[in-house]
Amino acid sequence: MFLIADIISFLKNPYFGNQQILSRKEKYRCLSNLAMLSILVGMLFFILFIIENFILKYYGIELKQKNFGFEKGYAILIISILGPFYEELLFRLPLSFRKKDVNASLFTLIGTAGFALLSLFKDVNLNRTEVSLIKYIFIITGAGIIYLFSSFTSESLGKVKISFGKYIVWGSLIVFTLAHLTNVANFDMRLLPIYLFNLFPIFFLGTVLSFCRLRLGFFYGFFFHAAWNFLPALLHT
């Protein structure tokens, strides 16, 4: 399939060919092809997970997913809209190396670190619905504000893109994938190979989202991310 070859080529050199201007119709066609590819890959991993689950149960091992405790009615808002938008701000917005995008992503990172530190020194449950809503609204709003007051120079960011852009895309993809290890409730270091195998769909998603970001645009990637998360969001309601 041409699309698979294009994605592999993208991973080898993310910034080669991303200057091509696509029409809206071409972007929609690309997005629909990515959706079909994702469905096929998802079906493959679903079969593999069934086989894996059967083997693990044979040995008495159960992998539990963390319950974030979102109240009914909030799950779709947080998991399918705010969460994906936040992750796109953090992991993929700055991949354009435009100064406003980089600043907005840095604010997102600083805001995330601030909330993490708050949870260390205060008795705050970051998984509570109310706290999650405040966190996402604060970070997304702040990112919008700092977007208007950028300080990086286009020249310096252009040099970084030329020298390190490919490695930054790869690093963002790896961090995005490994960050989802926190979704495992009964994490056991001895089962790390199994966890890493189970992260392959997330790695695939991150690759597709990075591809969307640089080939189609930020909001196309966000839409794809939101659609991907919609089913898990429904399962939480």
Image: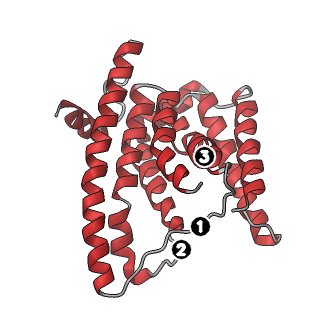
Q: Find residue 183 and name its label.
A: none
Where does the image place residue 57, in percent across and percent down from the top left?
33, 81
- Amino acid type of the residue that numbered disc 2 sits on in the rendered structure: Ala
Label 2, residues with CA under 10 Å away: few <14, some 14-19, many ≥20 = few
Name the residue nearer the viewer: 76 or 88. Answer: 76
- Mark 2, secondary structure of its residue: loop
Residue at mark 1 to residue at mark 3: CA–CA distance: 15 Å
For the residue pair 127 and 76, the one nearer the viewer reads as 76
Identify the residue shown where x is 43% and y is 81%: 189
- Callout 3 amino acid: Ile
- Tell me which label, 1 or 3, sits earlier in the chain: 1
- Residue 21 appears in the picture as rendered: no
Q: Earlier in the sequence, mark 3 or mark 2?
A: 3
The alpha-carbon separation of the residues under discs 2 and 1 comes to 8 Å
Task: Where is residue 32? Give x, y as percent.
Answer: 34, 28
Percent x, y of residue 17: 31, 24
Secondary structure of the residue carrying numbered label 1: loop
Q: Which numbered marker is on residue 76? A: 3
Q: Which residue is painted at 59% across and 54% down in the image?
A: 237
Kindly check if marks 2 and 1 are in contact, taking CB atoms under 8 A apart as contact. Answer: yes
Q: Secondary structure at mark 3?
A: helix
> On the image, numbered disc 2 is attached to which residue?
185
Q: Which one is in front in this view, the residue at disc 2 or the one at disc 1?
A: 1
Query: Which residue lies under the disc numbered 1?
Result: 67
* The residue positioned farthest toward the left in the image shown: 1
- Check disc 1 and give the amino acid type: Asn
Spatial distance from mark 3 to mark 2, Cα to Cα? 21 Å
Point out the image quarter for the N terminus: top left
| Sequence-first disc among 2 and 1 | 1
Which of label 3 and label 2 is nearer to you?
A: 3
